[in-house]
Image (spheres, rainbow, N blue to C red):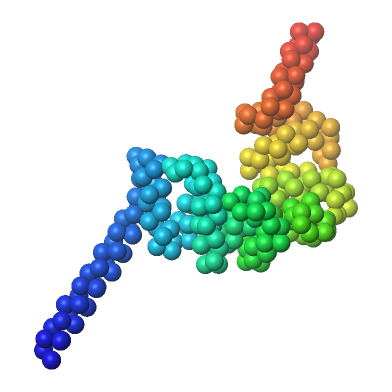
């Protein structure tokens, strides 16, 4: 009996040692991934894979993104799909949204709009702004579902109210064009400016045009120039061309004076 008890103690402490060892190794691996500025992309990917295979939903999402981009690992949409699914199956909203996007775009899996809609809705119902935006975009474009601009507006506004810049820009566009809502240039200006001030390059370009034309706001060429320059500085070709023309026109006016 004493031998059995002794064996059980050894077994218990041995198991405890293993559990503590795994916990410490996992914590160190997380620190390496989160704070290692000198690690190579491949080393960070290896750390992520360990965490992802331990069931860490955040790591599963991050690793899937690496498989999408090929940063530190060979580009592999199928592996991206698999790791997004692992995160989605845990109820992780980022995983659900990204998994839905794989179905929507047909990346790593055959395109399947009903499945995309399903996962967007799961994440959207939990308040995930990007999923709400993606769901609204599906309704706006009629992708795999009947086009419904009123539903599109509703979901995109939910995301915009959470300060999601793409949704703010899209909502401004819906007000600008009167899609799913009565046309309202003042509200269009308000939402497009919100997106532009968060750095959305498309919003910056359109906002500059609205200032130039006086749409929803009094004309203001100085502010128009400021926003067109912001867009140009981000590499927007159309904005760069408009900026060159504006500067040439200003130079000609100064010359004439």
- Is residue 230 placed above or below 256 in the rendered structure? below
- Furthest residue to the bottom? 1
Give the image quarter of residue 119: bottom right
Give the image quarter of residue 24: bottom left
Work out whether residue 157 or residue 96 is closer to the camera in this orientation and state it: 96
- Is residue 240 placed above or below 201 in the rendered structure? above
The image shows residue 90 at horizontal and vertical percentages of 52, 67
The image shows residue 130 at horizontal and vertical percentages of 64, 54
Work out whether residue 86 or residue 61 is closer to the camera in this orientation and state it: 86
- Is residue 246 placed above or below 218 in the rendered structure? above
- Furthest residue to the left? 2
Residue 167 appears in view: yes
Question: In the image, what residue occupies the spot 41% across and 54% down?
Answer: 49
Left or right of 183? Residue 127 is left
Give the image quarter of residue 156: bottom right
- Furthest residue to the front? 110
Question: In the image, what residue occupies the spot 71% across and 49% down?
Answer: 168
Count of numbered marks: 0
Quadrant, the N terminus:
bottom left
Left or right of 43? Residue 233 is right
């Amino acid at each position: 009996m004493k031998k059995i008890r002794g064996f059980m103690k050894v077994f218990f402490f041995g198991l405890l040692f293993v559990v503590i060892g795994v916990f410490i190794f996992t914590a160190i691996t997380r620190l390496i991934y989160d704070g290692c500025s000198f690690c190579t992309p491949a080393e960070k990917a290896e750390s992520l894979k360990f965490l992802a295979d331990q069931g860490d939903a955040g790591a599963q999402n991050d690793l899937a993104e690496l498989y999408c981009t090929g940063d530190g690992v060979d580009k592999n949409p199928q592996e991206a799909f698999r790791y997004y699914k692992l995160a989605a199956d845990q109820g992780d909203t980022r995983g659900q949204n990204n998994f839905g996007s794989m179905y929507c775009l047909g990346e790593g899996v055959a395109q399947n709009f009903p499945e995309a809609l399903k996962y967007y809705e799961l994440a959207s119902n939990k308040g995930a702004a990007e999923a709400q935006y993606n769901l609204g975009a599906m309704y706006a474009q009629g992708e795999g579902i009947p086009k419904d601009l009123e539903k599109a507006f509703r979901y995109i506004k939910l995301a915009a109210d959470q300060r999601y810049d793409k949704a703010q820009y899209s909502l401004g566009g819906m007000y600008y064009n009167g899609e799913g809502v009565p046309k309202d240039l003042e509200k269009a200006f308000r939402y497009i400016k919100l997106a532009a001030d968060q750095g959305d390059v498309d919003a910056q370009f359109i906002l500059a045009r609205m200032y130039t034309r006086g749409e929803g706001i009094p004309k203001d060429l100085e502010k128009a120039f400021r926003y067109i320059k912001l867009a140009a500085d981000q590499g927007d070709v159309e904005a760069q061309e408009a900026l060159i023309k504006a500067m040439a026109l200003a130079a000609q006016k100064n010359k004439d004076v």
